[in-house]
Image (spheres, grey):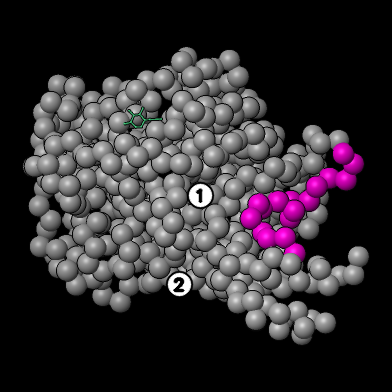
Amino acid sequence: MFSLERAVVCSLALLTSAVYAVKPVEVQGQDFVVADTGDRFVIVGVDYQPGGQAGYKPQEGEDALTNGTVCLRDAALLQGLGVNTIRVYNVDPTLNHDDCASIFNAVGIYMLMDVNAPFGGESLNRADPESSYHVGYLSRTFGVVEAFAPYPNTLGFFAANEVINDLGTADENPRYIRAVQRDLKNYIKNNIDRAIPVGYSAADVREVLEDTWAYLQCAIDGDEDDMSRSDFFGLNSYSWCGSDATFDTSGYDDLVEMFGSSTIPVFFSEYGCNDVQPRVFDEVQALYGRQMTSLSGGLVYEYSQEEADFGLVDIHSNGSVTLRVDFDNLQGQYNELDLSIIQSSNDTAVNLEPPECGRSLISSSQFSTDFDIPETPDDVADLISNGLDDPNRGQIVDVDETEVPMECYGTNGNVLEDLAIRPLPEDQSNTPSGEDTSGGATGTGAAPSATSSGAAVPAVGGVPQGLEYGAFMAFLMWLA
Ligand SMILES: *[C@@H]1O[C@H](CO)[C@@H](O)[C@H](O)[C@H]1NC(C)=O
Ligand SMILES: *[C@@H]1O[C@H](CO)[C@@H](O)[C@H](O)[C@H]1NC(C)=O
Ligand SMILES: *[C@@H]1O[C@H](CO)[C@@H](O)[C@H](O)[C@H]1NC(C)=O
Protein backbone atom coordinates (compact mmCIF):
# COMPACT_ATOMS: atom_id res chain seq x y z
CA MET A 1 0.00 0.00 0.00
CA PHE A 2 1.00 3.60 -0.61
CA SER A 3 3.09 4.68 2.29
CA LEU A 4 1.10 7.80 3.10
CA GLU A 5 -0.67 5.72 5.70
CA ARG A 6 2.62 4.84 7.26
CA ALA A 7 3.81 8.41 7.06
CA VAL A 8 0.67 9.61 8.82
CA VAL A 9 1.09 7.09 11.59
CA CYS A 10 4.69 8.12 12.13
CA SER A 11 3.90 11.81 12.01
CA LEU A 12 1.04 11.46 14.43
CA ALA A 13 3.51 9.96 16.81
CA LEU A 14 5.77 12.95 16.32
CA LEU A 15 2.99 15.48 16.67
CA THR A 16 1.71 13.97 19.86
CA SER A 17 5.09 13.32 21.38
CA ALA A 18 5.20 16.64 23.19
CA VAL A 19 1.70 16.22 24.60
CA TYR A 20 1.35 15.13 28.19
CA ALA A 21 0.32 11.56 27.56
CA VAL A 22 -0.98 10.77 31.00
CA LYS A 23 -3.25 12.52 33.45
CA PRO A 24 -2.10 12.71 37.05
CA VAL A 25 -3.50 10.11 39.41
CA GLU A 26 -4.80 10.83 42.90
CA VAL A 27 -6.17 8.89 45.84
CA GLN A 28 -9.85 8.55 46.64
CA GLY A 29 -10.52 6.27 49.61
CA GLN A 30 -9.43 2.78 48.68
CA ASP A 31 -8.69 3.62 45.03
CA PHE A 32 -6.26 5.42 42.83
CA VAL A 33 -8.27 7.48 40.35
CA VAL A 34 -7.35 9.52 37.30
CA ALA A 35 -7.81 13.08 38.51
CA ASP A 36 -9.72 14.42 35.50
CA THR A 37 -12.04 11.56 34.74
CA GLY A 38 -12.49 9.91 38.14
CA ASP A 39 -11.81 6.54 36.48
CA ARG A 40 -10.22 3.99 38.74
CA PHE A 41 -6.53 3.35 38.10
CA VAL A 42 -5.18 -0.13 38.80
CA ILE A 43 -1.44 -0.69 38.75
CA VAL A 44 -0.16 -3.17 36.14
CA GLY A 45 3.48 -2.73 36.95
CA VAL A 46 7.08 -3.86 36.92
CA ASP A 47 9.85 -2.85 39.33
CA TYR A 48 12.62 -1.17 37.39
CA GLN A 49 16.23 -1.02 38.60
CA PRO A 50 18.61 -2.01 35.81
CA GLY A 51 21.96 -2.89 37.34
CA GLY A 52 20.34 -3.48 40.71
CA GLN A 53 21.50 -1.34 43.59
CA ALA A 54 24.87 -1.01 41.84
CA GLY A 55 23.12 0.80 38.98
CA TYR A 56 22.83 3.77 41.36
CA LYS A 57 26.10 5.62 40.73
CA PRO A 58 25.58 9.25 41.70
CA GLN A 59 29.35 9.79 41.79
CA GLU A 60 29.37 8.97 38.05
CA GLY A 61 26.22 10.94 37.34
CA GLU A 62 24.12 7.83 36.72
CA ASP A 63 20.98 6.27 38.10
CA ALA A 64 18.20 4.14 36.59
CA LEU A 65 16.61 7.13 34.83
CA THR A 66 19.55 9.08 33.41
CA ASN A 67 20.26 7.33 30.08
CA GLY A 68 17.53 8.17 27.55
CA THR A 69 18.63 5.48 25.09
CA VAL A 70 18.36 2.81 27.75
CA CYS A 71 14.95 4.13 28.79
CA LEU A 72 13.79 4.17 25.17
CA ARG A 73 14.77 0.51 24.84
CA ASP A 74 13.11 -0.49 28.09
CA ALA A 75 10.00 1.63 27.54
CA ALA A 76 9.50 -0.06 24.17
CA LEU A 77 9.73 -3.50 25.76
CA LEU A 78 7.61 -2.58 28.78
CA GLN A 79 4.97 -0.96 26.58
CA GLY A 80 4.75 -4.15 24.56
CA LEU A 81 4.56 -6.19 27.75
CA GLY A 82 1.51 -4.15 28.74
CA VAL A 83 2.48 -2.36 31.94
CA ASN A 84 1.22 1.04 33.03
CA THR A 85 3.59 1.66 35.98
CA ILE A 86 7.21 1.21 37.00
CA ARG A 87 8.70 1.56 40.45
CA VAL A 88 12.18 3.08 40.57
CA TYR A 89 14.14 2.59 43.78
CA ASN A 90 17.26 4.72 43.82
CA VAL A 91 17.59 8.09 42.12
CA ASP A 92 19.84 11.07 42.64
CA PRO A 93 17.73 14.24 42.84
CA THR A 94 20.47 16.39 41.32
CA LEU A 95 20.65 14.48 38.00
CA ASN A 96 18.65 15.09 34.84
CA HIS A 97 15.83 12.56 34.34
CA ASP A 98 13.89 14.47 31.70
CA ASP A 99 14.48 12.15 28.75
CA CYS A 100 13.59 9.01 30.66
CA ALA A 101 10.55 10.46 32.42
CA SER A 102 9.29 11.95 29.16
CA ILE A 103 9.69 8.66 27.30
CA PHE A 104 7.76 6.73 29.93
CA ASN A 105 5.16 9.49 29.99
CA ALA A 106 4.78 9.34 26.21
CA VAL A 107 3.96 5.63 26.30
CA GLY A 108 1.50 5.93 29.16
CA ILE A 109 3.67 4.48 31.92
CA TYR A 110 3.53 6.03 35.42
CA MET A 111 6.42 6.08 37.88
CA LEU A 112 6.36 5.27 41.58
CA MET A 113 9.50 6.78 43.09
CA ASP A 114 11.37 5.83 46.23
CA VAL A 115 12.76 8.97 47.87
CA ASN A 116 15.51 6.96 49.57
CA ALA A 117 18.76 5.43 48.38
CA PRO A 118 21.28 2.91 49.70
CA PHE A 119 24.12 5.14 50.90
CA GLY A 120 24.49 6.40 54.47
CA GLY A 121 22.18 9.27 55.31
CA GLU A 122 19.84 8.46 52.42
CA SER A 123 17.19 6.56 54.38
CA LEU A 124 15.91 5.97 57.90
CA ASN A 125 18.25 3.74 59.87
CA ARG A 126 15.94 1.07 61.26
CA ALA A 127 18.35 0.30 64.11
CA ASP A 128 18.23 3.91 65.29
CA PRO A 129 15.67 5.99 63.40
CA GLU A 130 16.07 9.08 65.58
CA SER A 131 19.73 9.48 64.59
CA SER A 132 18.85 9.41 60.89
CA TYR A 133 15.88 11.78 61.03
CA HIS A 134 17.55 15.12 60.27
CA VAL A 135 17.74 17.91 57.72
CA GLY A 136 20.47 16.27 55.64
CA TYR A 137 18.32 13.23 55.01
CA LEU A 138 15.03 15.06 54.62
CA SER A 139 16.37 17.64 52.21
CA ARG A 140 17.36 14.75 49.94
CA THR A 141 13.82 13.41 50.00
CA PHE A 142 12.46 16.89 49.20
CA GLY A 143 14.95 17.04 46.32
CA VAL A 144 13.47 13.86 44.85
CA VAL A 145 10.02 15.43 45.15
CA GLU A 146 11.16 18.58 43.32
CA ALA A 147 12.92 16.54 40.63
CA PHE A 148 9.92 14.31 39.86
CA ALA A 149 6.82 16.34 40.72
CA PRO A 150 6.77 18.20 37.39
CA TYR A 151 6.28 14.96 35.47
CA PRO A 152 2.55 14.18 35.17
CA ASN A 153 3.34 10.46 35.21
CA THR A 154 4.83 10.59 38.71
CA LEU A 155 2.24 8.49 40.51
CA GLY A 156 3.56 8.65 44.05
CA PHE A 157 6.49 8.61 46.43
CA PHE A 158 7.53 5.82 48.78
CA ALA A 159 8.60 7.53 51.99
CA ALA A 160 10.17 4.31 53.24
CA ASN A 161 10.69 0.69 52.21
CA GLU A 162 10.71 -2.32 54.57
CA VAL A 163 11.89 -0.35 57.58
CA ILE A 164 9.71 -2.46 59.88
CA ASN A 165 10.84 -6.02 59.19
CA ASP A 166 10.00 -7.87 62.38
CA LEU A 167 8.71 -7.23 65.88
CA GLY A 168 12.17 -6.05 66.92
CA THR A 169 11.93 -3.12 64.51
CA ALA A 170 8.26 -2.36 65.22
CA ASP A 171 8.75 -0.26 68.32
CA GLU A 172 10.51 3.00 67.37
CA ASN A 173 10.26 2.98 63.56
CA PRO A 174 6.51 3.38 63.00
CA ARG A 175 6.52 6.92 64.48
CA TYR A 176 9.45 7.95 62.31
CA ILE A 177 7.88 6.61 59.14
CA ARG A 178 4.85 8.75 59.89
CA ALA A 179 7.14 11.71 60.59
CA VAL A 180 8.82 11.37 57.19
CA GLN A 181 5.43 11.01 55.48
CA ARG A 182 4.17 14.13 57.23
CA ASP A 183 7.21 16.15 56.21
CA LEU A 184 7.01 15.00 52.59
CA LYS A 185 3.28 15.69 52.39
CA ASN A 186 3.69 19.14 53.91
CA TYR A 187 6.55 19.86 51.54
CA ILE A 188 4.34 18.88 48.59
CA LYS A 189 1.40 20.86 49.94
CA ASN A 190 3.46 24.04 50.28
CA ASN A 191 5.73 23.82 47.28
CA ILE A 192 4.20 21.61 44.59
CA ASP A 193 1.13 22.40 42.53
CA ARG A 194 -0.51 19.00 42.78
CA ALA A 195 -1.14 16.52 45.57
CA ILE A 196 1.17 13.62 44.80
CA PRO A 197 0.44 10.61 47.03
CA VAL A 198 3.00 9.51 49.63
CA GLY A 199 3.05 6.03 51.16
CA TYR A 200 5.00 3.08 52.49
CA SER A 201 6.26 -0.22 51.05
CA ALA A 202 6.03 -3.07 53.56
CA ALA A 203 7.80 -6.39 53.85
CA ASP A 204 5.45 -9.37 53.77
CA VAL A 205 6.21 -10.42 57.32
CA ARG A 206 2.89 -11.55 58.64
CA GLU A 207 3.72 -10.90 62.32
CA VAL A 208 3.91 -7.16 61.59
CA LEU A 209 2.01 -6.69 58.34
CA GLU A 210 -1.50 -5.93 59.55
CA ASP A 211 -0.28 -3.76 62.42
CA THR A 212 1.95 -1.78 60.06
CA TRP A 213 -0.96 -1.05 57.75
CA ALA A 214 -3.28 -0.26 60.67
CA TYR A 215 -0.70 2.05 62.24
CA LEU A 216 -0.02 3.93 59.01
CA GLN A 217 -3.54 4.33 57.61
CA CYS A 218 -5.31 5.60 60.72
CA ALA A 219 -6.02 9.25 61.43
CA ILE A 220 -4.56 10.71 64.60
CA ASP A 221 -7.33 12.26 66.72
CA GLY A 222 -9.66 11.24 63.91
CA ASP A 223 -8.33 14.13 61.81
CA GLU A 224 -8.84 13.13 58.17
CA ASP A 225 -6.31 15.75 57.11
CA ASP A 226 -3.68 14.29 59.42
CA MET A 227 -0.57 14.77 57.29
CA SER A 228 1.34 11.83 58.78
CA ARG A 229 -1.12 9.23 57.43
CA SER A 230 -0.04 7.10 54.49
CA ASP A 231 -1.84 7.87 51.24
CA PHE A 232 -1.28 4.30 50.06
CA PHE A 233 0.16 1.01 51.28
CA GLY A 234 2.47 -1.14 49.16
CA LEU A 235 3.14 -4.73 50.13
CA ASN A 236 6.13 -6.73 48.88
CA SER A 237 4.41 -10.06 48.48
CA TYR A 238 6.11 -13.33 47.61
CA SER A 239 3.71 -15.90 49.00
CA TRP A 240 2.32 -17.29 45.71
CA CYS A 241 4.92 -19.68 44.34
CA GLY A 242 4.51 -21.75 41.19
CA SER A 243 1.54 -23.28 39.46
CA ASP A 244 0.46 -25.42 42.42
CA ALA A 245 -0.35 -22.40 44.57
CA THR A 246 -3.92 -21.18 44.95
CA PHE A 247 -5.74 -18.18 46.33
CA ASP A 248 -6.00 -19.98 49.67
CA THR A 249 -2.63 -21.75 49.93
CA SER A 250 -0.80 -18.54 49.01
CA GLY A 251 -2.51 -16.64 51.79
CA TYR A 252 -4.03 -14.20 49.32
CA ASP A 253 -7.33 -14.95 51.06
CA ASP A 254 -5.88 -13.52 54.29
CA LEU A 255 -4.71 -10.42 52.46
CA VAL A 256 -8.18 -9.75 51.10
CA GLU A 257 -9.60 -10.29 54.56
CA MET A 258 -7.03 -7.89 56.01
CA PHE A 259 -7.22 -5.13 53.42
CA GLY A 260 -10.79 -5.43 52.12
CA SER A 261 -11.89 -2.47 54.19
CA SER A 262 -8.71 -0.42 53.76
CA THR A 263 -9.33 3.31 53.60
CA ILE A 264 -6.26 3.82 51.39
CA PRO A 265 -5.17 1.96 48.23
CA VAL A 266 -3.28 -1.28 48.89
CA PHE A 267 -1.23 -2.92 46.17
CA PHE A 268 1.74 -5.25 45.72
CA SER A 269 4.79 -2.99 45.47
CA GLU A 270 6.73 -6.16 44.60
CA TYR A 271 5.50 -9.65 43.74
CA GLY A 272 6.59 -12.73 41.83
CA CYS A 273 8.04 -15.54 43.96
CA ASN A 274 10.96 -17.24 42.16
CA ASP A 275 11.12 -20.48 44.17
CA VAL A 276 9.71 -22.29 41.15
CA GLN A 277 11.38 -21.42 37.84
CA PRO A 278 10.62 -20.36 35.22
CA ARG A 279 7.88 -18.27 36.74
CA VAL A 280 4.41 -18.80 35.31
CA PHE A 281 2.73 -15.88 37.09
CA ASP A 282 -0.60 -17.60 37.76
CA GLU A 283 -1.08 -15.12 40.59
CA VAL A 284 -1.75 -12.43 38.00
CA GLN A 285 -5.22 -13.87 37.34
CA ALA A 286 -5.97 -13.82 41.07
CA LEU A 287 -4.60 -10.34 41.69
CA TYR A 288 -6.71 -8.79 38.92
CA GLY A 289 -9.68 -11.11 39.38
CA ARG A 290 -13.03 -10.77 41.10
CA GLN A 291 -11.82 -11.87 44.53
CA MET A 292 -9.21 -9.15 44.84
CA THR A 293 -10.92 -6.03 43.55
CA SER A 294 -10.20 -4.32 46.87
CA LEU A 295 -6.49 -4.26 45.95
CA SER A 296 -5.10 -1.87 43.34
CA GLY A 297 -2.92 -4.29 41.38
CA GLY A 298 0.82 -4.67 41.71
CA LEU A 299 4.35 -4.54 40.33
CA VAL A 300 6.32 -7.63 39.34
CA TYR A 301 9.83 -7.84 40.74
CA GLU A 302 11.69 -7.07 38.52
CA TYR A 303 12.54 -5.93 34.99
CA SER A 304 16.18 -6.95 34.69
CA GLN A 305 17.99 -10.10 35.72
CA GLU A 306 20.28 -9.28 38.65
CA GLU A 307 21.96 -11.32 41.37
CA ALA A 308 18.67 -12.00 43.13
CA ASP A 309 17.45 -13.90 40.03
CA PHE A 310 14.06 -12.26 39.43
CA GLY A 311 14.59 -10.86 35.93
CA LEU A 312 12.17 -10.65 33.04
CA VAL A 313 15.02 -9.71 30.69
CA ASP A 314 18.81 -10.05 30.44
CA ILE A 315 20.62 -6.80 29.79
CA HIS A 316 23.96 -7.31 28.00
CA SER A 317 26.98 -5.07 28.39
CA ASN A 318 26.70 -4.01 24.72
CA GLY A 319 23.27 -2.51 25.51
CA SER A 320 21.27 -5.33 23.90
CA VAL A 321 18.48 -7.04 25.76
CA THR A 322 17.25 -10.62 25.54
CA LEU A 323 13.79 -11.47 26.83
CA ARG A 324 13.60 -14.33 29.31
CA VAL A 325 10.83 -16.93 29.35
CA ASP A 326 9.40 -15.13 32.39
CA PHE A 327 8.73 -12.10 30.17
CA ASP A 328 6.68 -14.16 27.73
CA ASN A 329 4.85 -15.92 30.54
CA LEU A 330 3.95 -12.63 32.19
CA GLN A 331 2.82 -11.14 28.90
CA GLY A 332 0.65 -14.19 28.32
CA GLN A 333 -0.96 -13.70 31.74
CA TYR A 334 -1.54 -9.98 31.15
CA ASN A 335 -3.14 -10.75 27.82
CA GLU A 336 -5.73 -12.91 29.57
CA LEU A 337 -6.90 -10.13 31.87
CA ASP A 338 -10.33 -8.59 31.79
CA LEU A 339 -9.43 -5.26 33.31
CA SER A 340 -13.05 -4.12 33.27
CA ILE A 341 -13.51 -6.26 36.40
CA ILE A 342 -11.36 -3.92 38.44
CA GLN A 343 -11.73 -0.65 36.63
CA SER A 344 -14.94 0.41 38.28
CA SER A 345 -14.81 1.81 41.78
CA ASN A 346 -16.71 0.34 44.70
CA ASP A 347 -18.66 3.35 46.01
CA THR A 348 -18.61 2.07 49.59
CA ALA A 349 -14.86 1.50 49.58
CA VAL A 350 -14.14 4.89 48.07
CA ASN A 351 -16.06 6.64 50.82
CA LEU A 352 -14.74 4.78 53.85
CA GLU A 353 -13.55 7.07 56.67
CA PRO A 354 -10.13 6.33 58.16
CA PRO A 355 -10.31 4.86 61.66
CA GLU A 356 -9.07 7.00 64.53
CA CYS A 357 -5.62 5.94 65.68
CA GLY A 358 -5.54 4.12 68.98
CA ARG A 359 -4.32 1.09 70.87
CA SER A 360 -7.24 -1.04 69.82
CA LEU A 361 -6.10 -1.05 66.20
CA ILE A 362 -2.83 -2.78 67.02
CA SER A 363 -2.87 -6.50 67.76
CA SER A 364 0.72 -7.29 68.73
CA SER A 365 1.95 -6.24 72.16
CA GLN A 366 5.38 -5.54 70.67
CA PHE A 367 4.14 -3.18 67.95
CA SER A 368 4.14 0.51 68.75
CA THR A 369 0.90 2.06 69.96
CA ASP A 370 2.56 5.42 70.36
CA PHE A 371 0.98 7.94 68.01
CA ASP A 372 2.98 10.86 69.34
CA ILE A 373 4.87 11.62 66.11
CA PRO A 374 8.34 13.19 66.47
CA GLU A 375 8.29 16.92 65.80
CA THR A 376 9.68 18.32 62.60
CA PRO A 377 13.13 19.80 63.34
CA ASP A 378 13.24 23.61 62.92
CA ASP A 379 15.64 23.59 59.97
CA VAL A 380 13.41 21.06 58.22
CA ALA A 381 10.32 23.15 58.95
CA ASP A 382 12.06 26.09 57.25
CA LEU A 383 12.59 24.04 54.11
CA ILE A 384 8.98 22.94 54.17
CA SER A 385 7.79 26.55 54.42
CA ASN A 386 10.17 28.11 51.93
CA GLY A 387 11.14 25.27 49.65
CA LEU A 388 14.63 24.10 48.81
CA ASP A 389 17.02 26.71 47.57
CA ASP A 390 17.27 26.35 43.77
CA PRO A 391 16.21 22.70 43.47
CA ASN A 392 16.71 20.63 40.33
CA ARG A 393 13.21 20.50 38.81
CA GLY A 394 12.46 18.07 36.04
CA GLN A 395 10.45 18.99 32.98
CA ILE A 396 8.79 17.06 30.19
CA VAL A 397 10.77 17.35 26.98
CA ASP A 398 9.96 16.40 23.39
CA VAL A 399 10.46 12.75 22.59
CA ASP A 400 11.94 12.82 19.11
CA GLU A 401 13.46 9.37 18.86
CA THR A 402 11.03 6.46 18.83
CA GLU A 403 13.13 3.66 17.34
CA VAL A 404 15.33 1.60 19.65
CA PRO A 405 18.88 1.80 18.29
CA MET A 406 20.23 -1.36 19.90
CA GLU A 407 19.30 -4.89 18.89
CA CYS A 408 16.99 -6.79 21.21
CA TYR A 409 16.16 -10.46 21.06
CA GLY A 410 13.13 -12.59 21.85
CA THR A 411 13.33 -15.70 24.00
CA ASN A 412 13.93 -17.71 20.81
CA GLY A 413 16.98 -15.57 19.99
CA ASN A 414 15.33 -13.81 17.05
CA VAL A 415 15.90 -10.09 16.66
CA LEU A 416 12.79 -8.09 17.59
CA GLU A 417 12.13 -6.21 14.36
CA ASP A 418 11.21 -2.53 14.33
CA LEU A 419 11.41 -2.23 18.08
CA ALA A 420 10.14 1.24 18.98
CA ILE A 421 8.01 3.13 21.43
CA ARG A 422 4.56 4.14 20.27
CA PRO A 423 3.65 7.43 21.91
CA LEU A 424 0.04 7.36 23.05
CA PRO A 425 -2.49 10.13 22.59
CA GLU A 426 -3.23 12.40 25.48
CA ASP A 427 -4.75 10.94 28.64
CA GLN A 428 -4.09 7.31 27.76
CA SER A 429 -2.21 4.94 29.97
CA ASN A 430 -0.69 1.78 28.54
CA THR A 431 -2.60 -1.51 28.67
CA PRO A 432 -1.80 -5.12 27.79
CA SER A 433 -1.49 -5.38 24.02
CA GLY A 434 -2.76 -8.87 23.35
CA GLU A 435 0.49 -9.59 21.55
CA ASP A 436 3.36 -11.95 21.99
CA THR A 437 6.65 -10.09 21.80
CA SER A 438 8.99 -13.05 21.34
CA GLY A 439 6.77 -14.43 18.62
CA GLY A 440 7.24 -17.96 19.84
CA ALA A 441 3.82 -19.20 20.70
CA THR A 442 1.47 -18.01 17.99
CA GLY A 443 2.51 -20.26 15.15
CA THR A 444 0.92 -17.90 12.65
CA GLY A 445 3.99 -17.41 10.53
CA ALA A 446 5.65 -14.03 10.74
CA ALA A 447 6.68 -13.11 14.23
CA PRO A 448 4.73 -10.10 15.39
CA SER A 449 7.02 -7.20 15.99
CA ALA A 450 7.09 -5.56 19.33
CA THR A 451 6.19 -2.26 17.70
CA SER A 452 2.71 -3.39 16.82
CA SER A 453 1.85 -3.59 20.47
CA GLY A 454 0.72 -0.71 22.61
CA ALA A 455 -2.99 -0.60 22.71
CA ALA A 456 -4.28 2.88 22.50
CA VAL A 457 -2.86 4.24 19.27
CA PRO A 458 -5.81 5.40 17.16
CA ALA A 459 -6.55 3.82 13.84
CA VAL A 460 -5.32 5.74 10.82
CA GLY A 461 -7.83 8.47 10.12
CA GLY A 462 -8.69 8.89 13.76
CA VAL A 463 -7.62 12.20 15.20
CA PRO A 464 -5.95 11.84 18.55
CA GLN A 465 -7.37 13.90 21.34
CA GLY A 466 -5.41 17.03 21.93
CA LEU A 467 -4.57 17.49 18.27
CA GLU A 468 -6.71 20.05 16.49
CA TYR A 469 -8.58 18.73 13.51
CA GLY A 470 -7.61 21.70 11.36
CA ALA A 471 -3.94 21.29 12.12
CA PHE A 472 -4.25 17.63 11.36
CA MET A 473 -5.86 18.28 7.95
CA ALA A 474 -3.29 20.91 7.11
CA PHE A 475 -0.63 18.44 7.96
CA LEU A 476 -2.18 15.78 5.72
CA MET A 477 -2.26 18.25 2.86
CA TRP A 478 1.34 19.14 3.48
CA LEU A 479 2.21 15.48 3.27
CA ALA A 480 0.34 15.11 -0.02
C1 LIG B 1 -17.28 -2.74 48.47
O1 LIG B 1 -16.54 -2.33 49.62
C2 LIG B 1 -17.13 -2.71 50.84
C3 LIG B 1 -16.31 -2.06 51.96
O2 LIG B 1 -15.00 -2.49 51.94
C4 LIG B 1 -17.17 -4.22 50.96
O3 LIG B 1 -17.77 -4.61 52.15
C5 LIG B 1 -17.94 -4.79 49.76
O4 LIG B 1 -17.87 -6.19 49.78
C6 LIG B 1 -17.37 -4.28 48.45
N1 LIG B 1 -18.20 -4.69 47.34
C7 LIG B 1 -17.72 -5.35 46.30
C8 LIG B 1 -18.70 -5.66 45.20
O5 LIG B 1 -16.55 -5.69 46.21
C1 LIG C 1 25.36 -8.18 22.51
O1 LIG C 1 25.80 -9.10 23.48
C2 LIG C 1 25.05 -10.32 23.52
C3 LIG C 1 25.56 -11.14 24.71
O2 LIG C 1 26.92 -11.25 24.69
C4 LIG C 1 25.19 -11.05 22.20
O3 LIG C 1 24.45 -12.25 22.21
C5 LIG C 1 24.69 -10.14 21.09
O4 LIG C 1 24.87 -10.76 19.85
C6 LIG C 1 25.40 -8.79 21.12
N1 LIG C 1 24.72 -7.93 20.17
C7 LIG C 1 25.38 -7.12 19.35
C8 LIG C 1 24.56 -6.29 18.41
O5 LIG C 1 26.60 -7.05 19.36
C1 LIG D 1 23.57 4.89 27.41
O1 LIG D 1 23.55 3.48 27.36
C2 LIG D 1 24.01 2.94 26.13
C3 LIG D 1 23.73 1.45 26.16
O2 LIG D 1 24.28 0.82 27.27
C4 LIG D 1 25.48 3.29 25.97
O3 LIG D 1 25.97 2.78 24.77
C5 LIG D 1 25.63 4.80 26.02
O4 LIG D 1 27.00 5.13 25.99
C6 LIG D 1 24.98 5.38 27.27
N1 LIG D 1 24.97 6.82 27.16
C7 LIG D 1 25.51 7.60 28.07
C8 LIG D 1 25.42 9.06 27.83
O5 LIG D 1 26.05 7.13 29.06
Residue 14 point in image, percent of width and height = 66, 73
Using a 10 Å C-alpha cutoff, classify the residue at mark 1 as few (fewer than 14 neighbours), some (14 to 19) or many (20 or more).
Answer: many
Q: Image point 49% across, 19% down: which residue?
A: 247
Q: Is residue 70 visible?
A: no
Question: Horizontally, is 170 left or right of 108 in the view?
Answer: left
Residue 57 point in image, percent of width and height = 47, 58
Judge: label 1 CB < 8 Å from ligand 1: no
Q: Image point 10% across, 62% down: which residue?
A: 378
Q: Which mark is residue 85?
A: 1
Q: Measured along the vertical axis of the image, is residue 301 above or below residue 289?
A: below
Q: Quadrant of residue 471?
A: bottom right
Residue 91 point in image, percent of width and height = 42, 57
Residue 164 point in image, percent of width and height = 27, 34
Q: Image point 39% across, 33% down: which residue?
A: 294
Question: Horizontally, is 128 left or right of 294 in the view?
Answer: left
Q: Quadrant of the C terminus?
A: bottom right
Question: Does 404 lie within the magenta span?
Answer: no
Q: Nearer the viewer, residue 74 or 452?
A: 452
Q: Circle 2 — which element? A: loop
Q: Measured along the vertical axis of the image, is residue 282 above or below residue 87?
A: above
Q: Give the amino acid at mark 2.
A: Gln
Start-end of magenta stretch:
444-460
Residue holding disc 2: 395
Question: Does 451 lie within the magenta span?
Answer: yes
